[in-house]
Image: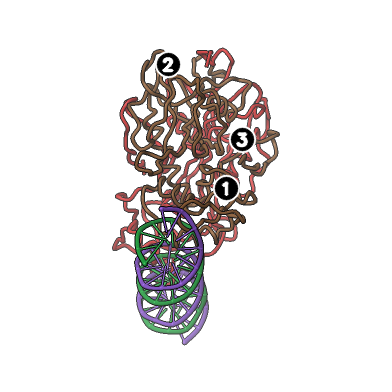
Chain colours: A brown, B red, C green, D purple
Amino acid sequence: MTRTDSAVDGIRVAVSTVIFSLRRDADGRLAVVLPLVRRTRDPHEGRWALPGGWLDSTEELETAASRTLAETTGLAPSYLEQLYAFGDIGRSPGRVVSIVYWALLREGAQLPADAENVAWFDASRPPELAFDHRHIVEYALWRLRNKVGYSRIAHGLLPDLFTLSDLREVYEAILERELDPANFRRQVENSGTLIPTERFRTGSHRPARLYRYNHDVELADRGPLPTDTPAPPVLPEEVTI
Amino acid sequence: MTRTDSAVDGIRVAVSTVIFSLRRDADGRLAVVLPLVRRTRDPHEGRWALPGGWLDSTEELETAASRTLAETTGLAPSYLEQLYAFGDIGRSPGRVVSIVYWALLREGAQLPADAENVAWFDASRPPELAFDHRHIVEYALWRLRNKVGYSRIAHGLLPDLFTLSDLREVYEAILERELDPANFRRQVENSGTLIPTERFRTGSHRPARLYRYNHDVELADRGPLPTDTPAPPVLPEEVTI
DNA sequence: ACAAAAGTGTTTCGGATACACCCATGA
DNA sequence: TCATGGGTGTATCCGAAACACTTTTGT
């Protein structure tokens, strides 16, 4: 409480993001995947790591997370939420506090053609990672699995129009277990989060009705969102989806 | 991604803690209270604020939270968990990222006799606070209320031995609504988190059995806990209660 | 016609709730 | 003995789960 400036101690603030999306594997099964970047310098040169960078003092935390995400994937997330602040001594040379975010990308997001040193990995079985990033990925995945149970977050992984089977597949991929189609249908229909359209997806067996996400319903609590002014309490802003 | 050190930008890292405890008011009702400190310097001189201070580069985040807590209340928390990292531009002069923790103190905790500029306040109706601390307190209270619904966190507010009525009162104080004593009893008895003792609390009407918390059961998930070594994944440590 | 996914109906089960009722003590 | 909180029993409700069944398409 006696110091007035921690900068003299050389504490550095970084921002990283765990980005989840979905990919269909050779067997046709959906799986949760995340993009990782290969480090091109020490420490941990050559290892895969979460996309991230240093926080700019003129940049909001969430903006920094979006920026690093855009720099590596070229895409905008459909959902972005702060995960945790990791600041253990020894997690990195020097003292680095990483404000980590987690994000969702809609299914089928592509890396830019010129993306180098970036690749998708199975979120459940990542390769050996730099720093404490494996720990971070595990926690982010836990949060995703947890949150899918009490929020509509799964919609953040789907395109605008989707069938109930699409949505169920997302849940199954995240939870890694099968769900009863009949009961799943009733649950989401009763939740009021879906708007049925008059369009159908054809091509195999009986056509399935296409649904659209009801934006009147919050996708999920994203935590305490930024205040515009320091003093007064502020209600949550709208989710950018 | 081009800079290598944010310290040159003067980003400062602070740690603050929202500490909850219980106090019985004049009507004999339990209420959630939190200690605040009066600021003795600018900015916001004279206003009440959360206890906190600058992070030392040789100090773990959680240690810093415990330290500031001890410095103001002289007591050790029964529960401590990271809440959120607040880093909005404009929340404070200069750029300050505050890693905020929240903590529980056992009922009846006393401030040291020499504590100055520290006082307890009703958590639901705090006074005008410095910085964005009102926003932070509201979020911490939301988290407490939320977590009490799916964890055994309420025990962190009680002493070693307590009656079921004591525990129910804690829930009622946090949730601000009355609970059915009969159903409450069954729920906690079936949860396996309580160990009945052969001691009873006497003094009014029928004596009530005293219970003890079963430490084999996790009090609550505290998030991704510190890793001892940077590389390998580490399972959650034991909660210090 | 048949396979397979889309979609509906129905039964069962378990936990949460409401509330009636008995028990043990202090005053 | 009576008021009061401690503690038990039980009926009811509601949503989740299990699963039989009908519908609609492609092949």
Chain under disc 3: B
Residue in the picture at 32% in, 34% down: B234
In this picture, residue B49 sits left or right of residue B81: right
Locate residue B67, reporting x and y percent: 46, 30
Determine whether the residue tagged by mark 3 lies in a helix, strand or loop: strand
Asked whether disc 1 touches disc 2, contact meaning CB atoms under 8 Å apart, the reply is no
Nearer to us of marks 1 and 3 is 1
In this picture, residue B225 sits left or right of residue A196: left
Q: Amino acid at mark 1?
A: Leu
Nearer to us of marks 1 and 2 is 1
In the image, residue A113 above or below residue B107: above
Q: Which mark is residue A94?
A: 2
Query: As rendered, which of A153 and C14 lies closer to the eye?
Result: A153
Whether residue B158 is visible here, answered yes or no, is yes
Residue in the picture at 39% in, 36% down: A123
Asked whether disc 2 touches disc 3, contact meaning CB atoms under 8 Å apart, the reply is no
Locate residue A105, reporting x and y percent: 52, 36
Nearer to us of marks 2 and 3 is 2
Whether residue B170 is visible here, answered yes or no, is no
Alpha carbon separation for disc pair 2 and 3: 31 Å
Q: Which mark is residue A161?
A: 1
Chain under disc 1: A
What residue does disc 3 label? Answer: B49
2 and 3 marks on the same chain: no
